Amino acid sequence: MRKHHNRLYYGKYRYKTVFQLPGSLMFYPTTDQYLSTLKLKHPKAKDLQYLADFIMQHRNTMKFRIQDKKAIFYSDQERSNELIDKFMTYWTKTVMVDPKLDFLDNPNTVGCFKLPHGKYPYAIVMKRDLHKHFSQTEKEALLNFVDRNIDHCLITSKFLLDYLEGKAPYCYHGRIYVDTEKFLSPIYMIAQKGIDRILKYVKINYESNKKTSRT
């Protein structure tokens, strides 16, 4: 079984820096040969030139993942701050975890400077093919529960909201954020067929590392 990236990299790299980066798939495959060719094809694209050079120069001191419209870097604080300074417009979050913390043994627990949306320590992650698991009754029940507890539950995914509200027939991803543990059980009872996992966020305060928590 493939190890979770957080567990695989946090033992060596304490900073996970995430960017919503348009055109990120242009950087795949990420070999030096391909990136050098990419730079030649786009000589006037300064951000592209910078990121290609950054990857080639530092690939031995960091790890990274390139996904659709998302670039994730696992590194030390210096590299994390360097990327944030350059791509502030696209920066979404930085998570810093002390590899000595015991909760790293649990792949569903994440250390962070700031709780998601400022107040939610739990995230219910729905299955990627949710529409294959939910009935109309379950959709309505889940939406009604969230609406009744709007001060404690939050859905930010347009795809999940549109699916639950009947505006879209399919749903391939989405999360429900919850601010109190007591709301996990009723949601699980309603939506257990469509739940992939439940994440718990643990807030960590490191006064010396405030720079990574810029907003």
Image (tube, rainbow, N blue to C red):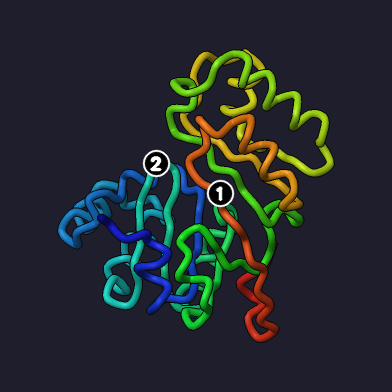
Nearest to the observer: residue 163 or residue 27: 163
Q: Quadrant of the C terminus?
A: bottom right
Give the residue displayed 45% in from the left and 70% down from the top: 105
Q: In which quarter of the image is the N terminus?
A: bottom left
Q: Position of residue 142 (x, y in %)?
A: 67, 27
Q: Where is residue 206 in the image (x, y as percent from the top left)?
A: 66, 81
Nearest to the observer: residue 9 or residue 7: 7
Which residue matches tag 2?
68
State how many labels appear.
Answer: 2
Give the residue displayed 53% in from the left and 21% down from the top: 134
Q: Where is residue 21 in the image (x, y as percent from the top left)?
A: 47, 48
> In the image, is 198 to the left or to the right of 14?
right
Under tag 1, what secondary structure? strand
Quote the CA–CA distance across marks 1 and 2: 23 Å
Under tag 2, what secondary structure? loop
Q: Position of residue 121 (x, y in %)?
A: 68, 57
Where 147 sits versus 30, above or below? above
As shown in the figure, which amino acid type bears the numbered disc 2?
Answer: Asp
Give the residue displayed 63% in from the left and 15% down from the top: 137
As shown in the figure, which amino acid type bears the numbered disc 1?
Answer: Ile
> In the image, is 189 to the left or to the right of 4?
right
> In the image, is 152 to the left or to the right of 66?
right
Residue located farthest toward the bottom when viewing the structure as drawn? 208
> In the image, is 65 to the left or to the right of 93?
left
Which residue matches tag 1?
198
